[in-house]
Amino acid sequence: MNNEQVWIVDDDSSIRWVLEKALSSANITSASFDSADNVLTALVHDQPDIIISDIRMPNMDGMALLNKVNQQYPDIPTIIMTAHSDLESAVNAYQGGAFEYLPKPFDIDDALALIQRALIHASETSTNNKQQIATPSSVGIIGEAPSMQEVFRAIGRLSRSSISVLINGESGTGKELVAHALHMHSPRSASPFIQLNMAAIPKDLIESELFGHEKGAFTGANSVRHGRFEQAHNGTLFLDEIGDMPLDIQTRLLRVLSDGQFYRVGGHSPIKVDVRIIAATHQHLEVQVNNGDFREDLFHRLNVIRIHLPSLRERREDIKQLADHFLTLASKELSVEPKNLHPKTLAFLEQYHWPGNVRQLENLCRFLTVMASGKEIILSDLPAEITALPTASNLTENSWQEFLRQWVNEQLKQDTDNIIEKVQPEFERILLQCALAHTQGHKQDAAKIIGWGRNTLSRKLKELT
């Protein structure tokens, strides 16, 4: 070896060949290895600037290699790539000390950009000590769609942090699961995870629920009650549907986040707490801030890191995996033989528009486990409320405009403001996803189809996913 910049480790010769050619075209020198054992032998005599390794290989896997490299050569950034693009793989990679996580199949432009960033990092950093953290058990988030990979990446990157996180996404997309995952894959995992849904609590009880109350603070307060903040001390407080929090409670919450202390209702002694806040909403908080319904200072305090959860319509490629998972769970709950979807049924579900998102799919699978007569679920087994509503394949040339018109009229009836702020990002997100799917992930071709420049497409990818 002669001081190659990049060492590629993968038992798949085609992956090694593709990366070698791409790196050569970018004037980056490289060497390839088909096993982790061979790399460790070579490292005794020479070291590259960075290593890019597959995670699943015979004998020693990529995580074991990553561990040894971090112990013996902590200055070498390692990129972990894998076709097993699940949450656990992403978190394991980051917590194991990987520089970055690259799910297969990958866009070669993205891979090159990542490798170049790692090379810059290697040249600027003389020491890169990695702390090994045990991985908690999985929380069951499923998804191989690119948009879900971004969610996994975010959870992995935040696994050593207690920073505030704001999760946004439509109802039923799994915001609570992501909040659980953020807690379990964090330094606070051994401490309590406490949650409170703002929309489920009467407004006059929210203050007492959050901060607790002293005995005699109000009629019926017969004893001291610890609120959710005290219960979550040293752990995580998950505030679901934060957009429904009353303004006066927002003020108190902001004060707690600023000072780290609060008073129980009816109390006179400050109570200090150390709590990580994870908030979630299906609403557009920026619009609420503009309308005066949400405090701008609190918004900025919560919006340190934002994770956007895609709707099920935006990750149709995950529907089969999700449905199989939910059908298996339902069969275990009911102690019956698991059922499977007929190909035509699956094709229909993949075109359905899923207003209730993943939660709706989970409930449907439970219904079908009980009600479908055969082991294979056919189209006629689906409930009428599913088959009667339009699917993507039902849409005629002009019907999407009609659906848009109906939706706008419905928003107007609800006195919704700033409608364009709700419509435009979704419109662009759908354009982007369809174009990337059509071009198999080639950004330049996708940008040309949409009518954007490459830089615009890259910027939109960051904004909308």
Image: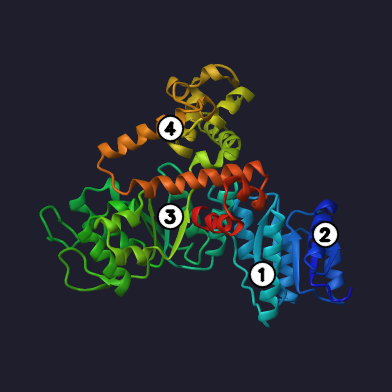
Amino acid beneath label 3: Ile
Q: In the depicted view, which residue is nearer to us: 406 or 388? A: 406
Q: Which numbered disc flags the more N-terminal residue, 2 or 1?
A: 2
On screen, residue 370 above or below 245: above
Between label 4 and label 2, give the one nearer the viewer: 4
Label 1 crowding class (10 Å Cα cut-off): few <14, some 14-19, many 20+?
Answer: few
Q: State how far apart marks 1 and 4 are (Cα).
A: 43 Å
The image quarter containing residue 67 is bottom right
Amino acid beneath label 4: Gln
Please identify the residue farthest to the bottom as the structure is shown.
126
Per the image, the residue denoted by label 3 is 167
Q: Position of residue 276 (x, y in %)?
A: 40, 65
For residue 401, the mark is 4
Per the image, the residue denoted by label 2 is 21
Name the secondary structure under disc 1. helix
Per the image, the residue denoted by label 1 is 117
Q: Are marks 4 and 2 in contact (CB under 8 Å)?
A: no
Please identify the residue farthest to the left as the structure is shown.
219
On screen, residue 310 above or below 24: above
Q: Are marks 2 and 1 in contact (CB under 8 Å)?
A: no
Q: Position of residue 445 (x, y in %)?
A: 66, 49
Q: Are marks 1 and 4 in contact (CB under 8 Å)?
A: no
Q: State how far apart marks 1 and 3 are (Cα).
A: 27 Å
Would residue 341 be seen by someone viewing this image from the given angle? yes
Q: State how far apart marks 2 and 1 are (Cα).
A: 18 Å
Label 3 crowding class (10 Å Cα cut-off): few <14, some 14-19, many 20+?
Answer: many
Q: State how far apart marks 4 and 2 are (Cα).
A: 46 Å
Q: Which numbered disc flags the more N-terminal residue, 1 or 4?
A: 1
Q: Residue at x 52, y 64 (%)?
A: 158
Image quarter (top left, top right, bottom left or bottom right) of the N terminus: bottom right
